Image (cartoon, rainbow, N blue to C red):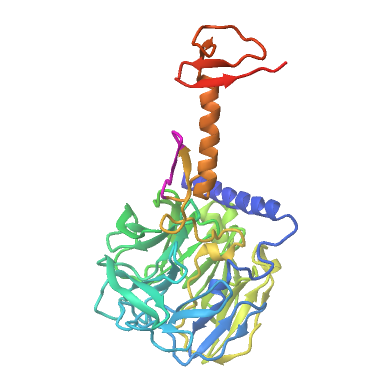
Amino acid sequence: MKHEMFTNTIKNILSVSKKFICILSLMSLFSSITSGQGEMSKWYFGWQNGLDLSTSPPTLLAGNPYAMGEPSATISDSLGNLLLYTYNGKIIFNANHDTIVNGAGLYGASSSHQGALFLPSICNENEYYFFTTSSEEQPPHRGFNYSKIEFSDATGFYVSEKNINLLPDALEAFTAIKHDNNVDIWIIAHGFDNAYYSFLLTEDGIDTTAVISSGFQIPSYRYTSVAVNLPGDTIVYHSTALDYFEFLHFDRLTGTTSLIWNDSTHWNDAVFSPSGRFLYTVDPYINSGIFQYDLSLGNITDILNDRVHFPGPFYSGIQHGLDGKIYALKILGSVGYFSAINNPNQYGLACNIVAAVTPTWNISMFQALPNIPHWYLLDNYWVDYPNCHESIQTYNCINNACIDPQDGSGLYDSLATCQAACNATAIEENEAEKQLLKITDVLGRESKPAPNVPLFYRYDDGTVEKRIVVE
């Protein structure tokens, strides 16, 4: 049953990809960086290193003065201008590499793998949320927390709300997935109690009451990683310490997770191919190189047995680029560079792995790449800021009165337009419903219609019309 469910999921993923291709006709989903992708176009990571993904292949980004830890995270504006980043989950820096106001003392940890993430506010383009998890190696263990970042002309970015706890205990890796409405955002973390917790970010902020999905197997404080397919309906969560993984279906409407299947194998980081057919993994500890798993086989035994191994030195991380390719961070001693999977939707050697597509730089082995939410990788997945109730007034004509529904959903975008429509409707309704009672002359005597004589037409709604028919 699990195998059948997973096969159907993969078919759905491939179907979604085909629909996108049909919609975009001959255009590629990943042909170029767009306004919906600039937010993730700058990476800071590793030992004073950075990468600019607005080019293909990416180019090295100068200016990072810090030795980055595992939970590196960045966010830029829609044009790709760097706004904020962290190298350890504890401090937030601006584009000038200065600590933002109240931006130190955050509850992250430099060894928390995939343990930091910036997300935009739903309605305010100058407001962001910053999420962190703590680490097994670095007590105290403070669980899963978020802070709110705002902007003012006087101070620039500053932390306005700090270290608000969502879970007292959480595993290191977490992720974010767009709600089914493509506006709100689910943030999914794993607790110590073998449950997944989904928190919803809306225009009103974070709902701290989680949707809980229980009954899973990964226990407390184990080194973990997470990957999400591009449509956002499949998650793979992995524990390196246990050599154990879970494939999950994620319901983007309800925020619930359900198990597709689980098994054992070892990897450090993973990423889905754009089509969803393949899973690529890397591992700097035991199995060096890159592995490709063909998920369309649908049977866990076949998938594991059929995996394709591309041998090579240690790889510390793997992540999507913004050009449809996948980039893996390769380690040779204390030197690092990127390899590219040029055709990640192709099986075996046809995926075309190029060993080195960037210059080399000094690097520590224990580095990770920034976590990129799935929607930034699709040109038409991002929905611009919605008509939030606090900023947009619209109106509906109800019982000949113009009413603002307070959520931007009204039929008319101005009061004058609504009033004109309401008045026209009222006149039409009035004329259609009134009934003629009688016709009288100037002396009040009942009369029949006659030419060249002033007559009064009296209706059941109390109105009187004076008419003269001239012949």
Left or right relative to 89: residue 336: right
Q: Is residue 232 visible?
A: yes
Count of marks, rendered view: 0
User: Residue at coordinates 69% horizontally, 18% vertically from top-left?
Assistant: 470
Instruction: Give the side of residue 239 with respect to residue 41, left or right.
Output: left
Q: Is residue 104 left or right of residue 235?
A: left
Q: Check the image and report above or below for 198 versus 160.
A: above
Q: Quadrant of residue 142?
A: bottom left
Report the span colored magenta. 398-406
The residue nearer to you, when weighing 96 against 405, is: 405
38 inside magenta stretch: no
Residue 197 position within the rendered picture, expressed as x and y whole percent measured from the top left: 34, 58
Q: Please tell me which residue is depicted at 53% across the width and 32% down the height of the picture.
A: 425
Q: Is residue 169 above or below residue 422?
A: below
- Find residue 283 and report its horizontal and vertical position in percent: 49, 75
Q: Position of residue 314 (x, y in %)?
A: 53, 81
Image quadrant containing the C terminus: top right
